[in-house]
Amino acid sequence: MNDNKIKHKILEMLSHQNVISSLPAAENSDIGLDDEVILAKVKITAIKYELLKLSLLEEQEVGRHNPKYVLGLYATSKGVHSFNTRKYIIENQNVFKTKVKDIVQIVIPVLSLLITILVIVRNDVKTSKEIETLNHKIEAIQKENKTLLKKIK
């Protein structure tokens, strides 16, 4: 799973927790989730999680959550908006489109070159066969001419 999908999943969990915490009959009234809970759900290494968390903090889409002295995160209004507008999914699609575009820009000229070489080689073989056929016809005509010349003499 790439970084943008993981960020989206983190924002999804935190946005849901944000909404659940505001409901009157909520079991867990905390606005955020502990790092351990998030890490267990996204199933990535702690180092990668910390890097993604720093990125989300830098974008101010999440804030630090510290109930009962356990570190965690909560979704800010900007984070909820990013989740709802599928910011990181769209970003991921744009990255994919760019990679496909780059690959196509490389593959098409290479294929064009290969096709051109194939056509040239094919035409060369066809031309060689035509020349060989013409040589055989010329030889046949020359033999006929020699035969006719002998008859005339």
Image (cartoon, rainbow, N blue to C red):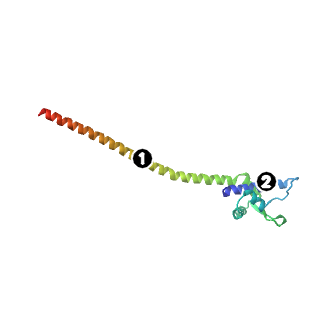
Q: Which residue is drawn at the image coordinates 45% and 49% (left, top)?
A: 114
Of the residues shown, which amino acid type is indicated by label 2? His
Foreground residue among 22 and 112: 112
Name the quadrant containing residue 151.
top left
Q: Can residue 114 be seen at all in this image of the molecule?
A: yes
Relative to 105, 16 lies left or right? right
Foreground residue among 46 and 54: 46
In the image as oriented, which residue stretches furthest toward the left?
153
Question: Dot 2 corresponds to which residue?
Answer: 16
Q: Position of residue 103 (x, y in %)?
A: 54, 53
Q: Position of residue 142 (x, y in %)?
A: 21, 38
Question: Dot 1 corresponds to which residue?
Answer: 118
The nearer-to-camera label among 2 and 1 is 1
Q: Which residue is drawn at the image coordinates 36% and 45% (left, top)?
A: 124
Residue 23 vertical placement versus 69 (above, below): above
Q: Residues within 10 Å of mark 1 (few under 14, many from 20)?
A: few
In the image as oriented, which residue stretches furthest toward the top?
151
Name the element at disc 2. Answer: helix
Relative to 6, 71 lies left or right? right
Measured Cα–Cα span from mark 2 to mark 1: 59 Å
Q: Position of residue 62 (x, y in %)?
A: 75, 60
Position of the N terminus, as image quadrant, is: bottom right
Q: Position of residue 93 (x, y in %)?
A: 64, 52
Relative to 113, 18 lies left or right? right
Q: Which residue is drawn at the image coordinates 44% and 47% (left, top)?
A: 115
Of the residues shown, which amino acid type is indicated by label 1? Leu
Q: Residues within 10 Å of mark 2 (few under 14, many from 20)?
A: some
Q: Which residue is drawn at the image coordinates 28% and 39% (left, top)?
A: 134
